[in-house]
Image (cartoon, rainbow, N blue to C red):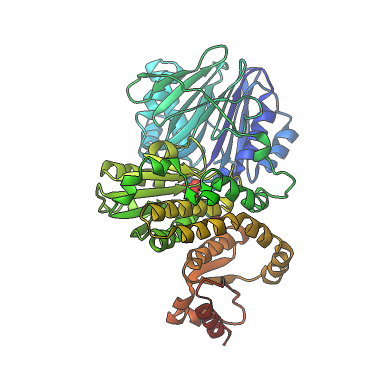
Amino acid sequence: MCGIVGYIGHREAYPIILKGLQRLEYRGYDSAGVALYHDGKINVSKTKGKVDDLRKKVESSGNMEGHLGLGHTRWATHGVPNDTNSHPHYSNSGDLVIIHNGIIENYESIKKALIARGYVFHTDTDTEVLVNLIEEVRDKEEVKLGKAVQIALNQVVGAYAIAVFDKNKPDEIVVAKLGSPLAIGIGENEYFVASDASPFIEYTNNAVYLEDEEMAIIRLGKEIKLRKIKDDAIAYPNILELQLNLEEIEKGGYEHFMLKEIYEQPRAILDTYRGRLLADKGLVKMAGIDQNLEKFLNANRIIIVACGTSWHAGLVAEYIFEDLARIPVEVEYASEFRYRNPVITENDVLIAISQSGETADTLAAIKLAKEKGAFVFGVCNVVGSSIARETHAGAYTHAGPEIGVASTKAFTTQITVLTLLALKLASEKGIFSASQFHEILAELENIPGKVEEALKSNNLVAHIADIYKDSTNCLYLGRGYNFPVALEGALKLKEISYIHAEGYPAAEMKHGPIALIDEQMPVVVIATKKGHYEKVVSNIQEINS
Ligand code: M6R
């Protein structure tokens, strides 16, 4: 995943691009770069490291001027993270500059052919291949940039959100999308391009989200021209008025976005319940379900697909659905599911869980299930995201933007939505008496307050972290609902502390992994009162001994 930002208009592009990259740094943070057009020249600065390293580099070079520019924050796919492989990339003539989020799968064969025709490559990236292919088409076919981009994209296989400009036409940016997100912000005689709306939200609320296989020619003083990449058909921009609030996407006084997002959980869970959990009336209301109840009630089984943290939320949901709604559930890694010819029938319901709504494997799994006739329901956080658009129906988590790359509030709000969904189905199936149901809902209403209470243990957490910060391994154990929570805890430790960690069902320890336990191995056990407490305590005793 990478973040892209572009600007064309009457303002200085650099400050807009820099701030935009800082907001998009959650999408990639191994290198960053910016290209600015000024006085007939393109000044490119790029560096391995964070956006702040880029800022220092640009500011010491003094090349900060220009009203047209592109910026990129990278999470490497082709070529190691270094200054050279960082984006933007330019074509052999130096005329064209590109930023790209995605992967060009057939870049090697295109590169070979371009080399045979005299092109020279300076980086290991697939993106440099694409920009040179565009240039070759432009020169050979004698077409404008937009047409050249279109012809070139019809030759590539893969995924992309790209923005390109030509220094001979500094009033224009060409963008295109397939599989990676791309939003265009429309201001007064100015345009913004970005992976999401956060880089331009303080300048304009009007945005167009490109659909897959669409491209746009953005020209100053003109309306955006949208086309289908494949057949050149004209598409009409659907201009949305965004409700995103800038305050929501800034750090709000916390040192890190992740910390801010951890503390936002009580509010995020409450927002996710709002209007859906009506404890006083003993009701759960969810429009996406109400309109599709029969699909769920008649389903043979529910298949949940997701990746990473969202997959862990799916595992928790498996326990919840089976326990509360008595519906069989299978939970699949989207990346495995899509490639293994799974058995899916018209009587299956597929639930796709994704914070971003843009995870390529999850999207592909959705498309596969739809082809086979299954009903597909999305649980996403980002409104209008690809997954939200691709599913038949869905329910948003109302967590607000999750900028931290390590998911926190996304996980708890996903579980919130999935719990509501299970309860809704349980009530439709008449599994609980009215008073039991009422009791569960009332208890759920207390969750935000309990999370608030748990967050007060911050000092204790800091103290424990200090003791174990130099450990090289760690185990997380839990049973029942707490097993997926253990998996999620281990993922967070790996991702954030670079400490090797594994999550296990607590009772599995005795089947081999206990051999790993010694004085150096911290073991975190999730032992809540209702999570098979006595059994977990026995597991703790085994580990102690
Ligand atoms: O946006 P998604 O929920 O689809 O993302 C899937 C995973 O990449 C994501 O959950 C990832 O595992 C977490 N951010 C890790 O903390």
Answer yes or no: is residue 398 visible.
yes
Q: Is residue 95 above or below residue 487?
A: above
Q: Nearer the viewer, residue 508 or 68?
A: 508
Residue 446 picture quarter: bottom right
Q: Nearer the viewer, residue 241 or 235?
A: 241
Q: Nearer the viewer, residue 73 or 291?
A: 291
Q: Is residue 355 above or below residue 192?
A: below
Q: Is residue 19 left or right of residue 169?
A: right
Position in image of residue 449 (x %, y %): 65, 56
Q: Is residue 520 left or right of residue 62?
A: left
Answer yes or no: is residue 136 visible.
no
Q: Residue at x 63, y 71 (%)?
A: 471
Q: Residue at x 67, y 49 (%)?
A: 260
In this view, the residue farthest toward the bottom is 545
Q: Residue at x 64, y 34 (%)?
A: 245
Q: Is residue 281 left or right of residue 212?
A: right
Position in image of residue 360 (x %, y %): 42, 44
